[in-house]
Image (tube, rainbow, N blue to C red):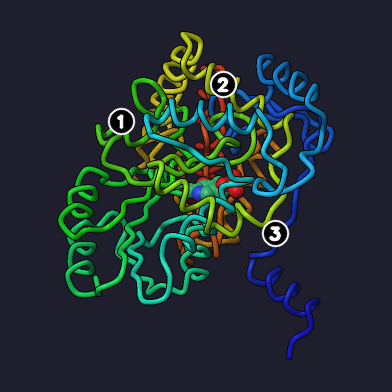
Amino acid sequence: MPTFAEELDKLREEGLYRSMRVISGAQGSHVELEGRRVLMLCSNNYLGLADHQALRSAAVMGVAFGVGSGASRLVSGTMELHARLEERIARFKGTERALVFNSGYAANTGIISALVGRGDAIFSDKLNHASIVDGALLSRANFHRFGHRDVAALERLLEEKGGSGRRLIVTDGVFSMDGDIAPLKEMARLARRYDALLMVDDAHGTGVLGATGRGTAELLGVMDDIDIHMGTLGKGLGSFGAYAAASETICDYLVNKARSFIFSTSMPPAVLAPSIAALDLVDSAEGKGLRDRLAANVALFKERLAGAGFDTMGSETQIVPIFVGPADATMRFSQELLEEGIFLQGIRPPTVPAGSCRLRCTIMATHEAADLEAAADTIAHVGKKLGVI
Ligand SMILES: *Cc1c(COP(=O)(O)O)cnc(C)c1O
């Protein structure tokens, strides 16, 4: 049996070793990384809300309710701000009710393992987020993966493997490492035809996509066709945590059955209050302005990258991957960009399939056009030197 140290050495040899980089100060379109000011091109803080004054003030207001919540939701940890945030999310998503979870990871593992179990069937896009896969494993339901965005493959599976138990179709709204969008309209049609529940994880669409920032389902005109809207509060919304927005019955069921909801201390007030402020902001004229600026920034950056000859892997959103392929070349690319003042992480297995390593650029509303243009030019320069283009 190899030792832990030997396994770590093996990761280093394969170019798959990972470590963390420390940022000083707040998150923003530029950050201070290990003593240098660099352009942030790998944060999910798409609207720049993580350091917004309205969220800071809300966090301070939240502390008026104390710091800790003291218990799990069902014991004595449900505070006024939990109720207020849940009402706000339900109103945002247009559902009967919503529930807050402590993270997107906890939401997916809790929701999926509550809704289906042994003898039931889960149908999952093969590029769905790891937390969906872990929720499926935890549920012990039969787990069927279909090809990425392949609706015909999903229909075949529903026909052949539907079984007699419950059926759950689950998909990312925006795929986190590719930046493309799930065919929700067709999936909703299949869910109805095959009597399946449809759950959408909109970690990357929430606050960002659709005319009013309701997310991927709004963009595709299927808000009312999703049984469980799962989303996160820590990415576009700049705060922390996650939610399920659904019918009264499904939420009530989750309160009684979702183990990550039941067996965990509830979210503290200073984290709840900024989430409410973020949703108010998304609904304001300022929020609309941020979404418009983000869309303009994305268009500009993609045009520049395409002009240089990069493969952005079919991205349809603010997540813009640059295909590289091998792990070592990806990490060299990332390292050279950092030396040029651009913070852009390489993404490797197990996050993406072997041989499809990429730089995952994420665009923010608060990026300046000139910074994005200069960054694209630098990326092209380094990409040429390394033979990527
Ligand atoms: C980030 C992410 C999660 C996890 O959310 P956290 O709040 O960070 O735990 C779940 N699903 C998708 C698609 C994500 O990108």
Q: Are marks 2 and 1 in contact (CB under 8 Å)?
A: no
Of mark 2 and mark 3, the one earlier in the sequence is 3
Could you tell me which residue is drawn at 66 percent across and 25 percent down?
Answer: 273
Residue at the extreme front: 75
Q: Quadrant of residue 58?
A: top right
Could you tell me which residue is drawn at 24 percent across and 70 percent down?
Answer: 162
**Count of number-bearing discs:** 3
What secondary structure is found at the residue carrying circle 2? loop
Question: Would you call the spot at circle 3 few (<14 residues within 10 Å), some (14-19), or many (20 or more)?
Answer: few
- Amino acid, disc 1: Leu
Horizontal relation, residue 208 to residue 79: left or right? left
Q: Which residue has dot 2 on it?
A: 367
Question: Would you call the spot at circle 1 few (<14 residues within 10 Å), some (14-19), or many (20 or more)?
Answer: some
Give residue 238's position: percent from left, percent from top: 61, 29
Q: Is residue 386 visible?
A: no
Q: Nearer the viewer, residue 116 or 249?
A: 249
Give residue 348's position: percent from left, percent from top: 56, 59
What secondary structure is found at the residue carrying circle 3? loop
Check mark 1 vs ligand 1: CB closer than 8 Å? yes or no: no
Give residue 167's position: percent from left, percent from top: 30, 63
